[in-house]
Amino acid sequence: MNLIKKVKNTGICYLFIFPSIFIFLLFFVFPIFYALFLSLHSTSMLSPPIFVGLRNYQELFHDKTFWMSIKNTFIYSLIFVSSVVSLSLFVAVVLNTKIRMRSIFRGLYFIPVICSVVVVALIWTWIYNSDVGVLNYFLRLVHLPPQNWLGNINMALVAIAIMAIWQSIGYYMVLYLAGLQGIPRQLYEAARIDGGSSWQVFWHVTLPLLTPTILFVVIISTITSFQVFDAIYIMSSGGPANSTSTISWLIYQTGFQGFRMGMASAVGYILFAIIFVLSFVELRTLGLRFRY
Amino acid sequence: MKKGLFSSIVLSAGMICFILNMVAISAAIGKKIVITQWSFPLTEEKAEFTNTVQEFEEANPEVKVNIEFFPWSYRVERFMTAIAGGVAPDLGYLNADYFTIFADSGNLISLNKYFSEEEINDLKNPYKWKGHLYIMPILQTVVPTFYNKRMFREAGLDPENPPLTWDEFFTACEKIKEAGMWPFTEPILHEDPFTIVNPWLFQAGGSYLNEEGTKVTLNNEYGLEALETIVKLHDKYVNPCENSLKAAERGPRFGEERVAMCYSEQQSIRVFRKDYPQLDFGIGHILKYRKRQSHGTVAGYVIFSQSKHPDVAAKWLTFLTNTENVAEFCAELYFISPRKSADSLVKEKINDPLFSRAVDESAYTRLFIAPIRSTLNVVLMPKVQAAILHQVTPKQAFDEVTEKAQVLLDQYIATH
């Protein structure tokens, strides 16, 4: 009787949240399991899938292109995460002080975040153009040799990372600003009274109390960096010579260009596993340094 | 109160369903048969088919032809996704190079019963696959060498006598380079490696597959010679900045006179004349080495097996690709007619010596048709790029491609 009453009382609530749950199940949960199903099959999605067991995973582990994509993804992630974590923090600390036109600077830093990645990537492709790009124009002005930014195997990935860092700094800056404003003013006053220099105040007060925010930024930026796709699609198509081929690009290329959706799903699951493990490791190791 | 609320919800839902049902029924009664065709724009106005559609609909008032235009990039993936989602159009534009994977998976309808032997024999290149005609061509292209006459003159070359053989081509490149100009354009961040590789591979006497289509032969002596030639071309005669450019930059680089020669399809004659009126250019030869062959394409329309009205779609397709309509379409857009009967009509309407030159060169067109074409694409381009950038030797590049492609081919044969 109690249960029936409970259902009657709460039934209408479930009715209201049912559309969201349905959409969540349909577009999030179902694809996760369907991708697992596909990863155990050989299919182009044009005809019924054929069960192949773990063959896709086996083939992947012997595929040089796959390992190159893993390597590129880790390199990209390292560059991206280390840069946004530090640069965004620096910008946030500066814009947390009482400087003139602070609000305008905050807005300016945030504008790239709200721009479409496609538009930003297209513009940066022209900035990087080795013939007529503005970057090489300035290099020539100061008598430095122009670079083939997106056409050089060693530079292309870094060039794309720089674009992504430029676009993302504003977002992480906002997260840091929120964290900075949560630090009690009295602690700063106390530190100043004790004779602490600006650097000492930052190192012994600001940084430890900002650790939860830093942890959040590290995890989110890691996940974001592992999922990079649009910039590569627009700027380099994974080239030259797979030097900018990341795991997400490999998924697209294998599934949609190579007509091997089963293999692409297997790569997708490996990406999921990598992100899961990395996030777990970051949470456990960096999370131990939580301080209040 | 709660009972009342529950009843209200049920009644409201019932009313909505009833109304929607009535709307659907009334829509069905007055409904025309709608044939959807996916095309890709060949003009800015996207008006290629307006008159043809109007004429067909007037003759067939129960049919409405709905032509939807999409961007060219990644069109094969678009069809693949649509088929997987069960929302493929009735007709779609495909190139003969890669319709086979759709045919093999049972997603295309055989057109054999819709076209007579006479109509099929009128086609210059009826690309049948396993005995069936799946694609009804509407255009043909050839990819000859376009060359800048002014730059040729400046380099001391005869602008009325473009190179024919590999030796003549590279001699011309050397002279153009010595005159301080870039001889050739070939961006390497290309979606489709076949336009880079095919000319040299075919001219060297090479091939992607053996005759039976069961073995990848890219890394034989002819394939290696072709890739070595491509690498040499890029080392000496292509601006290194093109390592970061995509295929779309090729035309503008030639049009803006940054390079003396390029490979481009013959419809670029019209585009160059319109966008670069000062450009003094000519149509060169398809080069000759061991063979005189190069890349080109035949494209047309297929009927997808998901079509709910295949007979009506076929009726429209028959009309769209008849001699008169093909002649008009090709003449307006500078395409070579895929129909023998429309050839002279197109030439007459265009009346352009450059176009006539291109038509002459089309006799040397060769296509690479195989179901693994798209899969090979993914494997081939990075290795070609790696060879051009000297990350690997040409032999290493094509050995790896051959090994990987053979595995993919064997898997494909085993499952089809």
Image: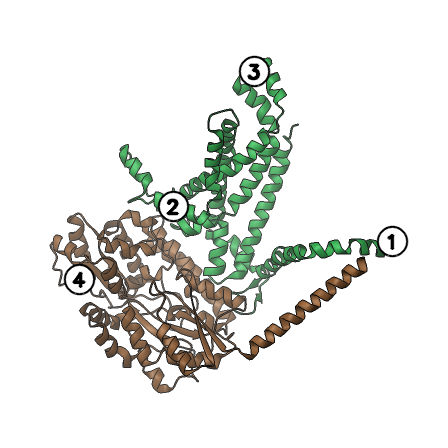
Give the brown chain's letter.
B
Query: Could you tell me residue B230's position as x and y percent?
Result: 28, 56
Viewer-nearest residue: A30 or B162: A30
Side of B208 relative to B80 (left or right): left
Picture mark count: 4
Label 2 sits on what residue type? Ile
Q: Earlier in the sequence, mark 1 or mark 2?
A: 1
Tag of residue A2: 1
Please tell me whether mark 4 or mark 3 is closer to you in this view. 3
Residue under pointer 3: A196
Are the residues under marks 3 and 2 on the same chain? yes
Q: Residue at x 77, y 56 (%)?
A: A11
Please tell me whether mark 1 or mark 3 is closer to you in this view. 1
Q: CA distance from mark 2 to mark 4?
A: 39 Å
Are the residues under marks 1 and 2 on the same chain? yes
Q: Earlier in the sequence, mark 1 or mark 3?
A: 1
Residue under pointer 4: B163
Viewer-nearest residue: A162 or A77: A162
Are the residues under marks 1 and 3 on the same chain? yes
* Crowd tier of the residue under label 2, counting other residues whose Cα lies within 10 Å: few below 14, some 14–19, many 20 or above: some
Q: Residue at x 52, y 38 (%)?
A: A171
Q: Compared to B318, does A242 lie above or below?
A: above
Label 4 sits on what residue type? Pro
Label 3 sits on what residue type? Gly
